[in-house]
């Protein structure tokens, strides 16, 4: 905790300006060319970024309009079903449990089929069955480039190509192939926390 994992994701999503250095995402220099990539990025953060006074379906329809998705109804229905919210799709977000809101937020993050998916603890508030559903949309099999912040080291390192381990002070403890680092070694030396 406190290593800057969430800050890193917010910089990659062009929501924060880096205090120093250079950042390039999908070929665009941030923050100068953020306009080139914002619509190509999906972000699932700690906050679901959903309007509490709208239903899940209304939230997704609103986001579809922001991304200029034509005739989104079928895609929205498919996503709602895929995350197990079928009957709850027309409920107001404010009436949903934290786990159900997280499922809806996953739908929002992948709705526009982003090239880059930024995931900050996507399994939080989800039971094991819901995590499997979420992983089917956000995991390695989704075909997207993903940056995942997680404390679930075994799962992360098993599916990641590259790993970045941050130290508590924000420094980089390891950057390289995920297959070259063991979860037990990360925990022993650095505690928990991997970005993949």
Image: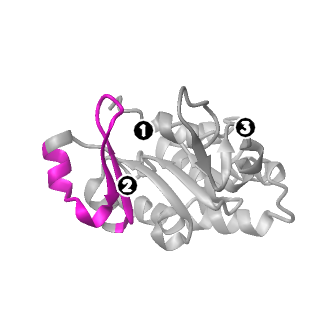
Task: Give the label, 3 or 1, closer to the camera.
Answer: 3
Q: Mark 1 points at which residue?
A: 5
Q: Residues within 10 Å of mark 1 (few under 14, many from 20)?
A: many
Mark 3 → mark 2, Cα distance in angstroms: 40 Å
Badge 3 or badge 2: first in the primary sequence: 3
Task: Give the label, 2 or 1, closer to the camera.
Answer: 1
- Disc 3 + disc 2, Cβ < 8 Å: no
In the current view of this chain or complex, which residue is farthest to the front? Answer: 21
Q: Name the element at disc 3.
A: loop
Badge 3 or badge 1: first in the primary sequence: 1
Q: Is residue 177 left or right of residue 188?
A: right
Point out the image quarter for the C terminus.
bottom left
Give the residue at x 81% y 48%. Answer: 66
Point out the image quarter for the N terminus.
top left
Q: Closest to the observer: 119 or 168?
A: 168
Q: Name the element at disc 2.
A: loop
Q: Which span of residues is magenta-colored?
A: 159-188
Q: Name the residue under label 2.
A: 127
Q: Mark 3 points at which residue?
A: 32
């Amino acid at each position: 905790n406190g290593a800057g994992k969430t800050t890193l994701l917010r910089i990659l999503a062009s929501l924060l300006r880096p205090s120093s250095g250079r950042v390039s995402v999908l070929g665009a220099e941030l923050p100068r060319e953020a306009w080139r990539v914002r619509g190509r990025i999906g972000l699932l953060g700690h906050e679901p970024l959903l309007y509490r006074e709208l239903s899940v379906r209304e939230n997704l329809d609103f986001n579809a309009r922001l991304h200029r998705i034509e005739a989104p109804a079928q895609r929205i229905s498919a996503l709602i079903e895929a995350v197990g919210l079928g009957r709850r799709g027309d409920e107001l977000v404010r009436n949903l449990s934290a786990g159900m809101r997280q499922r809806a937020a996953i739908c929002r993050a992948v709705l526009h089929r982003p090239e880059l998916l930024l995931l900050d603890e996507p399994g939080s508030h989800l039971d094991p069955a819901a995590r499997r559903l979420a992983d089917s949309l956000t995991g390695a099999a989704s075909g997207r480039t993903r940056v995942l912040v997680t404390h679930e080291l075994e799962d992360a390192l098993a599916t990641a190509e590259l790993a970045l381990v941050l130290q508590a002070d924000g420094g980089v403890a390891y950057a390289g192939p995920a297959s070259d680092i063991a979860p037990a070694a990360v925990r022993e030396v650095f505690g928990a926390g991997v970005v993949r």
